[in-house]
Amino acid sequence: MHLARFTDLALRAIVLLGARQDGPRLTVDDVAKAVHAPRHHVAKAVHRLGQLGVLETVRGRAGGLALAAGAASTTVGWLVRELEGTGELVDCEQPPCPFRGDCRLRRALRTAQHAFLAALDEVTIADLIAGTSVPLPLAPPPPR
């Protein structure tokens, strides 16, 4: 299974913000620096997490990002479904596959996808952040 970079960034942002719950609010720039990703990619992920009710975003001088109340009980499986969608792993229509009527591979991949998401349904945000700490200031990205 493979998660899109968007989903990866969203999950990393959640872990980072969850680990920093007791500290000062972080900004999109802080998160981008910590996860070594472009600011605009992180901003899109954070925006979507806000729409889903997982993150709270506050504008202004005392603003920043934080996990929303109740977000800790959200499952990773639900988040992945919301961020990735529920489409099949392979597209049997474009180009048309001659085996699509009776394809064992498609069924096997669908079964694996359901098992993957079922395993993630057992993990909550609280599980991801339990015992995790991130020191501030955040480390600079590694040299290229």
Image (cartoon, grey):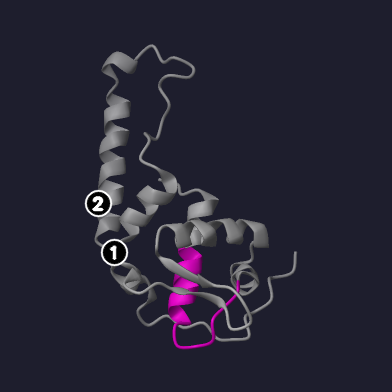
- Whole-percent x, y for residue 142 in the image: 69, 70
* Identity, as a three-letter code, of the amino acid under mark 2: Ala
Q: Earlier in the sequence, mark 1 or mark 2?
A: 2
* Residue 26 in which image quadrant: bottom right
Q: Secondary structure at mark 2?
A: helix
Q: Please report contact status of discs 1 and 2: CB closer than 8 Å, yes or no.
A: no
Q: Secondary structure at mark 1?
A: loop
Q: Is residue 96 above or below residue 111?
A: above
Residue beneath the point at 42% across and 73% down:
67
Residue beneath the point at 29% across and 35% down:
110
Q: Which numbered circle lies on residue 123?
A: 1
* Identity, as a three-letter code, of the amino acid under mark 1: Val
Q: Is residue 48 above or below residue 61?
A: above
Q: Is residue 82 above or below residue 111?
A: below
Look at mark 2 in the image and give the residue it sits on: 118
The answer to whether residue 78 shows anywhere in this view is yes
Question: Separation of disc 1 and disc 2 at Cα?
Answer: 9 Å
Q: Residue furthest front?
A: 60
Quadrant of the image containing the C terminus: bottom right
